[in-house]
Image (cartoon, grey):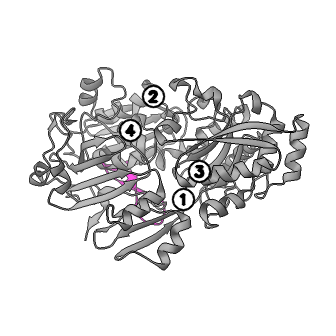
Amino acid sequence: MEDCVWSVNRRAFLKTGAVLSGGLVAAGMPLSQAIWAAEGKVLKVRSTINMTTFDPGFYSLNHEVDVMNCIYSKLTRYKAGSQWGWELEAAEKIEKVDPTHIRFRLEKGIKFSGDHGELTAKDVKFSFERIIKHNSPVKVDWGSLDHVDIEDDHTGVIVLKTPFVPLWMMSLPAAVGHIVSEDAVIKATNDGGNFGTKPPAFSGPYVLADWKSNQYTLLTRNPDWTGPKPGFDEIRIVPMDDVKSAERAYQAGDIDFTEISLDSLLNFKNNPPVDTKIEERPSLDCRWIGMNMDHPKLKDINVRKAIQWAINVPQILDAAYSGQAAVATGLIAPGIVGHRDKALVPPEGNVEKAKEFLEKAGLADLALTIDTLNDSLSLTMAQTVQAQLSQIGISLQINSQDSGSFWTLGMESEGERWKEVQLISNLLASFPDPAYPVSWYVRAQVGIWNWERFRSERYDRLAAEAVTIDDPNARAKLYQEMQDLMEDSGAYRFLTHGGTPIVYRTTQMQTATRPDGYPLFPAFKPV
């Protein structure tokens, strides 16, 4: 397997004092402080999120995949570099037989940790089908998957109900493409369902040695890995929601790799820390102000339109990003099929037009709330929106929350909070296929990830059709219309895709990232 995953140094692994049993993270056995002073090559990085799961079939946040890339294997993976593409990982060969059949042949000798044997086509079948069987919230990533046929221990065929073009750039190389051990997961869960934060077996170059919510994730070399040796003995991942805190941590030497804010980019360029390289990467993420269409105060489309037109996007970006971020025209970022040249509502909005819509709703004033993450960037954006809406007689109360609370806000499965949601300062991390960002706003996602509770039969039909089309120009037209439908509902005011400036210490590492700056930790090398 070409420079994908890596072998383990058993001596370095044992130095950490981590105790693993059958591939399971040792429950109730915290690592001693000695682990943080262990000898060997250590990669210290920041994550923008607090991990909530290590189960690829039930992932919640895209940066959780950064860890999954280290501890599991996939048929294919994203290429590192500035251009989007994929390459083989656990697959020795993969080919499209026809639009609904993809045959793969696995590399031989990939082992699961513990006594769970070799990674086989049976595990591939189990890993992919369990996502559909257990009705995972992220089953949309697999689109029209029907089942996987097994031809022999190392060969199988992925069978789709209908063509699913995003399989190549979304399903296989990303989260739901990771392969878990059927034997280990069945033993751990009985039914093959969600194993959450306790992976029962590993098949990548690293293992999850320890994890403390809101504190750290510690990865160490996998003693059962027989592939190329990974660059680092340990990877220490520290969650920091707030980018300003991450910048201070980098400057203090506590971490050696992090994303920085766009408004700090110029300062870092003018006064770079010693031995630091700065890279600017475009982002696929999207930020917008969303509105819960089912809330009594927001049921009238005239109220939603008034809010859309009252929001001046360039003002928000000046305040939050010091003018370093470009205006978004929709969910789909520049360079991705389906990107719109412009939005329906001009970026600057129009206060007088906003007042007219409010008058049509029969209102002179209105009190609303906006839910937002509590990091400095999100709060600045919410405060700017608050000031803008005050110009048309809308008072806005800001409800700031940590990531653990915020990311369950609109989920019906998590209680009744969704009923109280009004405005949302929302954020979506994406993959390089347009099907991913638009897939969360079909009717079936209402109460899951569709927090605006947007419903459109036409949108759903376009979403189903677009994933079957190979021609990028024909696909683009459908995705552009879908974004028009979202915006025309009044429930969305698209803000920006931001950017992904990253900094790292050149004396510590050679990095490997996706084109959007997301780290591919298994390919990081020490200097």
Measured Cα–Cα span from mark 2 to mark 1:
29 Å
Measured Cα–Cα span from mark 3 to mark 4:
31 Å
Which is more toward the observer, 151 or 479? Answer: 479
Residue 442 coordinates in the image, percent (x, y)? 63, 34
Circle 1 residue = 283
Query: Which numbered disc, 2 or 4, marks the residue closer to the eye?
Result: 4
Measured Cα–Cα span from mark 1 to mark 3:
20 Å
Residue 344 coordinates in the image, percent (x, y)? 79, 51
Residue density around tag 1, few if under 14, some if 14–19, many if 20 or more, within 10 Å: many
In magenta segment, residue 91: yes
The quadrant where residue 498 appears: bottom right
Q: Which residues are magenta?
A: 77-94
Residue 422 coordinates in the image, percent (x, y)? 68, 35
Q: Is residue 513 visible?
A: no
Mark sitting earlier along the chain (1/3): 1
Q: Which mark is residue 56?
A: 4
Q: Amino acid at mark 3?
A: Leu
Left or right: where does residue 8 sit relative to residue 344?
Answer: left
Measured Cα–Cα span from mark 2 to mark 4:
13 Å
Q: Is residue 254 above or below residue 420?
A: below
